[in-house]
């Protein structure tokens, strides 16, 4: 992987997880962040900081988009136009139309676009997928997923629905993607969100979202997202029931290493680092890098990213209108989301 | 005090008989005249195996003028027993769901009201001391305002041993009716009886024990919105396989403005592995919630104070179930007819 030229755009929390993964793969990384934080992050990991998006993209084989969601489309389209493959952080975009436009542009340009649905690379979720796909749970009937962390007040745009889509789109899209990956296309979505749903979000803000997904095959999934009080530890859980039994996971239940007695506020309180195997971010980037180099398709595609945005957009619409949103079958192309007209 | 356990249709009848038989000062009488003849798990045979006195007919048991009755018939057959108990002047503890229709529940509540007897709905989980602590933490403001609740009440399919649980007429539904009400009752307690405003539900009957699809749903997800803005997301599935080490469980997470609280009504006391069964060992811990609930009921009978959870609680939680079934039919959230907090009647 030596000499792979990567432009990493953004210098926030996700860039901080991607950059060491690229460095570990031997890539040459040019870092640009509109907020001026690139030089510091670049120094920390021995990357090069550049002064403009154009400068970062020029000559790069891969552009890794780690900026706020409302900027993904513009940066991705610029990268695609320059002939670069793109890894774009999730959600691909705030609307399925925009996400679809990005995927189409990549396809027309003959480059790859992969969304950073990193949860597919977390060992517990990857194993769950193996179990379900291998029939270990029989036919799945009902599943629930929770994702809990502190409210992301450290960066103002998360709380702004116009920039991030809010908790349903920014956070719960992880489990929307997982549910669709495991149990198939989603045909009906109902969601609610409550708590502090606007920017600015003060320290101590709390918001939650709940969604029920109905899959074409009949399984039903509950997704719960929590942006909790400041001392909330990051934690994810799932519980899946099928005709072959149940499976459950709690990321806080069985730790390789549990540290107690230290003063709280130590590093790694924010984004999870996985366990002591390879970082899931690293697994993700290695798998994408191999695909960019002509290797096998990774476990997540650009169309998966579009489909996840479509579910999130339906959830946001449901939360806004209070109604269920029906999703038409995905093939051949994503369509706009119809509402009402329910016929069981 | 003379207490009658009426019908052995419900799996809890034997539990109540066991608890009442142990108590001093209780004269226990039982009756199960609607039992299928010859069923060793029902009727006089069950009463004898449990060492409980038995009456052969409803007339006979009500002629004994019990001070209190525990109604453990099929859900759709609660009403006639509750009406009869009220007419006899007996206080009532009625299994959940209180009824299968709002009309039946209303008649039962009114009958007890007119007769001046208490009507308590059998929701044992709120008697957990841990839940009491949760209520106190909410009441004293240390959680801040409640934003949402998510919980799971999963368990074994009771129709495996008691087929009427999967009879839409007798049970009023399947897992959704059977399990949604427990978490609905806990939220009812946390919100001091606020009537839900809107309910959304999805369900299926995929879990069928390798048999034909049952007539009722075996998996259900229910989302309930309350006028104050609180949303409760509930997994009410009968998703424990037949050989699961526990019958059922109930866990609930409350997200407040200041803290997140997780409540487990049935935490294991001990775990491990049991070579004899080849399964995980699961030694139940915690308080005997059925005993705590019975204690409260008997105390209300002695003192004449109003029981809690009462019939109105039973009706409010039943309305959530009925709206959930309407939501299954329409595919849309269903507004409760009485969403402004008044309970009518």
Image: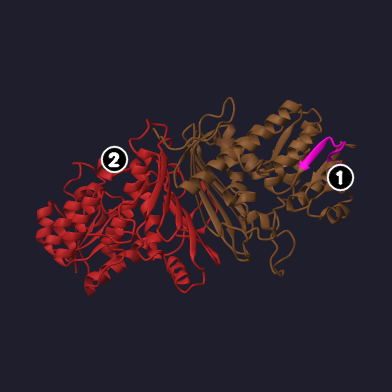
Question: For the C terminus of chain A, which image quadrant?
Answer: top left
Label 1: chain letter: A
Vertical comparison of B191 with B59: above or below:
below
Q: Residue at x 47, y 57 (%)?
A: B149
Horizontal placement of A265 versus B137: left or right? right
Residue A30 is tagged as: 1
Where is residue B135 shown, x and y percent of the image?
Answer: 43, 68
- Tell whether position A304 is magenta: no
Horizontal placement of B20 versus A95: left or right? left
Label 2: chain letter: B
Question: For the N terminus of chain A, which image quadrant?
Answer: top right
**Residue B158 makes an appearance in the image:** no
Q: Residue at x 59, y 44 (%)?
A: A175
Do tag 2 and tag 1 residues touch (Cβ < 8 Å)? no
Image quarter for residue B317? bottom left
Give the magenta range: A55-64
- Tell whether position A61 is magenta: yes
Q: Residue at x 49, y 72 (%)?
A: B141
Image quarter for residue A229? bottom right
Where is residue A37 shown, x and y percent of the image?
Answer: 81, 55
Where is residue B93 shown, x and y percent of the image?
Answer: 25, 61
* Rendered colour, chain A: brown
Residue B184 is tagged as: none
Chain represented in red: B
What is the C-alpha distance between the residues marked 2 and 1? 65 Å
Residue B168 is tagged as: 2
Pick the residue in front: B133 or A75. Answer: A75
Horizontal placement of B332 versus B319: left or right? right
Vertical comparison of A39 with B202: above or below:
below
**Residue B97 makes an appearance in the image:** yes
């Amino acid at each position: 992987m030596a000499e792979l030229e990567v432009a990493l755009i953004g210098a926030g929390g996700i860039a901080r997880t991607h950059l060491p993964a690229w460095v570990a793969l031997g890539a040459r990384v040019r870092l640009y962040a509109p907020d001026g934080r690139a030089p510091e992050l670049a120094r920390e990991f021995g990357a090069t900081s550049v002064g403009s998006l154009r400068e970062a993209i020029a000559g790069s084989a891969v552009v890794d988009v780690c900026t706020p969601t409302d900027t993904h489309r513009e940066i991705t389209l610029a990268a695609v136009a320059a002939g670069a493959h793109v890894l774009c952080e999730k959600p691909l975009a705030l609307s399925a139309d925009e996400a679809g436009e990005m995927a189409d542009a990549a396809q027309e340009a003959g480059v790859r676009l992969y969304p950073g649905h990193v949860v597919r690379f977390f060992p517990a979720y990857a194993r769950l997928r193996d179990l379900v796909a291998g029939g270990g749970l029989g036919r799945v009937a009902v599943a629930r997923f929770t994702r809990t962390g502190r409210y992301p007040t450290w960066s103002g745009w998360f709380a702004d629905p116009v920039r991030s889509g809010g908790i349903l789109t920014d956070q719960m899209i992880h489990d929307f993607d997982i549910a669709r990956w495991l149990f198939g296309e989603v045909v009906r979505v109902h969601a609610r969100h409550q708590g502090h749903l606007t920017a600015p979000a003060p320290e101590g803000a709390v918001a939650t979202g709940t969604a029920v997904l109905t899959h074409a095959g009949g399984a039903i999934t509950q997704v719960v997202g929590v942006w909790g009080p400041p001392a909330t530890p990051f934690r994810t859980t799932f519980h899946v029931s099928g005709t072959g039994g149940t499976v459950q996971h709690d990321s806080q239940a069985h730790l390789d290493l549990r540290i107690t007695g230290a003063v709280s506020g130590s590093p790694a309180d924010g984004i999870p680092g996985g366990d002591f195997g390879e970082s899931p971010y690293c697994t993700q980037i290695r798998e994408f890098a191999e695909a960019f180099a002509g290797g096998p398709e990774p476990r997540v595609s650009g169309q998966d990213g579009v489909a996840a945005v479509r579910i999130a957009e339906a959830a946001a619409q449901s939360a806004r209108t209070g109604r269920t949103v029906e999703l038409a079958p995905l093939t051949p192309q994503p369509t706009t989301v119809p509402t009402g007209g329910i016929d069981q | 005090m003379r207490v009658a356990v009426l019908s052995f249709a419900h799996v809890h009848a034997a539990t109540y008989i066991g608890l009442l038989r142990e108590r001093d000062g209780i004269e226990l009488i039982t009756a199960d005249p609607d039992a299928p003849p010859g069923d060793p798990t029902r009727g006089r045979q069950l009463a004898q195996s449990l060492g409980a006195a038995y009456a052969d007919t409803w007339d006979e048991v009500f002629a004994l003028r019990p001070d209190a009755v525990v109604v453990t018939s099929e859900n759709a057959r609660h009403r006639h027993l509750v009406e009869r108990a009220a007419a006899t002047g007996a206080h009532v503890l009625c299994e959940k769901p209180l009824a299968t229709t709002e009309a039946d529940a209303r008649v039962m509540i009114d009958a007890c009201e007119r007769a001046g007897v208490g009507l308590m709905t059998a929701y044992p989980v709120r008697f957990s001391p841990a839940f009491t602590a949760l209520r106190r933490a909410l009441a004293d403001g240390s959680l801040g305002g409640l934003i949402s609740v998510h919980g799971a009440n999963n368990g074994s399919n009771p129709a495996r041993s008691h087929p009427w649980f999967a009879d839409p007429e007798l049970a009023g539904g399947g897992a959704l009716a059977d399990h949604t009400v427990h978490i609905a009752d806990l939220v009812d307690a946390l919100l001091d009886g606020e009537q839900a405003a809107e309910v959304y539900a999805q369900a299926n009957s995929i879990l069928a024990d390798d048999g034909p699809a049952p007539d009722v749903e075996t998996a259900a997800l229910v989302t309930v919105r309350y006028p104050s803005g609180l949303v409760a997301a509930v997994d009410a599935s009968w998703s424990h396989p037949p050989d699961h080490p526990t019958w059922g469980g109930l866990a609930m997470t409350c997200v407040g403005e200041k803290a997140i609280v997780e409540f487990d009504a049935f935490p294991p006391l001990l775990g491990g592995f049991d070579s004899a069964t080849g399964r995980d060992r699961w030694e139940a811990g915690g308080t005997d919630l059925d005993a705590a609930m019975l204690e409260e009921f008997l105390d209300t009978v002695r003192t004449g104070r109003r029981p809690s959870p009462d019939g109105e609680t039973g009706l409010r939680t039943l309305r959530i179930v009925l709206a959930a079934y309407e939501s299954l039919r329409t595919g849309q959230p269903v507004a409760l007819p009485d969403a402004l907090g008044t309970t009518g009647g």
